Image (tube, coloured by chain):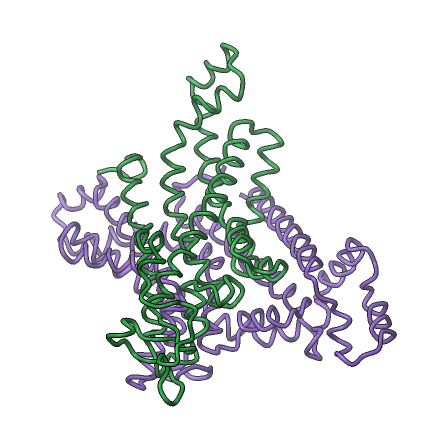
Chain colours: A purple, B green
Amino acid sequence: MRNYVLRRLLQSALILLGISLVTFILLYLIPADPARQIAGRSATAKTVANIRAQLGLDDPVMIQYFRYLGGLVQGDMGRSYLQRAEVSVLIAGRLPASLLLMVSAIVTELILGLTIGIIAALNRNKLADQTLMVFSFVSISAPQFVIGILLLYFFSIQFQLLPIGGYGTFAHLILPSLTLGLLGAGWYSRMMRSSMIDVLHQDFIRTARAKGIAKRQVITGHVIPNAILPIIAMVGIDIGLFMSGIVVVESVFGWPGIGQLAWQAIQRIDIPVIMGVTIVSAIAIVLGNLLADLIVPWIDPRIKIK
Amino acid sequence: MLIAAIFAPWLMPHDPFEQSFDGLTLMGEPLPPSEEFPLGTDLLGRDLASRLILGARTSLVIGVLANGIAVVMGAFVGILSGYFGGWLGMILMRFTDLMMAFPALLLAIVLAAIFKPSLLIVALVIAMVNWVQMARVIYTEARSLAEQEFIQVQKAIGSGPSRILFRHFLPHLLSSIIVFGTLGISTTVLLEATLSFLGVGVQPPTPSWGNIIFENQTYFNTAPWLVFFPGSAILLLALAFNLVGDALRDILDPTLKGHH
């Protein structure tokens, strides 16, 4: 076990290193001159040249990369080209909002997805099952920005039940987490359904029923707990989906998280900020995968570590 | 929708690029659906129905093109690393690990920002992000296929790698490639719509369902049809490919369906 954890940690570190290198080179290729952006339009050629020299932009790309990496391991992500602030400070200021949104989306997708999956499996091939599965197909096929805009239209504009966007109260949280969680709810309901059906067919369930335990009790006491285990472990993998989702959802709802920060930075080509958000997202995704890999064998000892 | 895309020029009730004077209210606002404009008009007074029909072309062309590239790339990498294994397989699979940990949408946006987005570039960007899943699925299958006896026998009797790969590997993997290829179209369509919605995908005036919503989103409280119709179009297209893919999986590959 210890070796396995160490190996996975090392692998994760290498993946992060690779991502930082690829992103750095991609951003280096963007045809925009950061020095000119900082100096402003009216700056003289001399000022621009000075800024280039100051930032070390004339050095070869690999030297620039290693300089960036050196700062990164000390928690220094450089300064934003357009906002007068450290990138790490900008991200740290935005992170709580995004984390709140993600946690709330995870709760939403689990509650929705698991409930739907359980009901569908218990009513297998009946009308309820078929209706719910149509719903889950629709929710994995619907683009998040459309769901977001339509929810806004109905709940905020037509019925004026919820705020139209922004951040602060529980009411602000409802629509964004629903939008972000709906996709996952679709996947979870399908997985939960087949996981439930799997467990329902196993011998120990038949034994429990044969011993005379009530059907209801078997389902709540044995089937559901066993069926849920492999699914809870998937939550770690979801982080990747969320990291894409928050860019869209935060821009639709004006949610002040790192997705919005990334989106604004991309529109204005603020390279250090794009780089910083990509690294932070990649760390979150890698940690999520790591967590999933470590939790699975822990909660379900039948799965052996290779 | 296929029909709409192919016969677009004859189906469109109006010129999709014409900024009609009749297409706006006196206040300069978009018109709701009417007899003249069946789905209403957009913020520039253009006929929404015509733009949606032409947009079907954009979405399908990108969907098929991007997914085609992704499928070929993914299958190629998957088969290569699954069959040969060794250091080549290891390097390729570590590379897919890296791609899996990339925040996909951020990567696509950054790529789209580097190259000025044209139809082909958008398709390539989406393919760059989407080939990885295919590579993983095919790798896993190719790996177990390579260990099977009939492949070992082929190797033993001296068949060359190209003969084994084309005569024995590809036919076995074809059903997975078709299933995940079909499911992949729906992912592609959704990603294209999202990129265009964020303004880094297909550029106006070329209509795509995503950029129609992007252009008109400021009007959505007074003109919800401008979001509702293109949104439903994206949903239906993605849904169609998801359903077909799912059905194909049940037909072509009963082992994936799970028992019972």
User: At which x and y percent is residue B149?
Assistant: 42, 18
User: At which x and y percent is residue A266?
Assistant: 60, 68
User: At which x and y percent is residue A77?
Assistant: 70, 67
Q: What's the residue at 49%, 57% (across, down)?
A: A240
User: Compared with residue A106, is residue B167 higher up or lower down, i.e. above or below?
Assistant: above
For residue A235, what is the image quadrant? bottom left
Looking at the picture, tell me which residue is in the foreground, A50 or B223: B223
Q: What's the residue at 40%, 83% (across, down)?
A: A164
User: Compared with residue B116, is residue B70 higher up or lower down, i.e. above or below?
Assistant: above
User: At which x and y percent is residue B193?
Assistant: 43, 62
Residue A185 seen from this side: no
Spot the residue most to the top. B157
Spot the residue most to the bottom. B27
Give the left or right position of residue B13, taking residue A290 as reference.
left
Give the left or right position of residue B119, taking residue A148 as reference.
right
Looking at the picture, tell me which residue is in the foreground, A161 or A207: A161
Q: What's the residue at 35%, 57% (across, down)?
A: B8
Give the left or right position of residue B235, taking residue B81 as reference.
left
Residue A80 seen from this side: yes
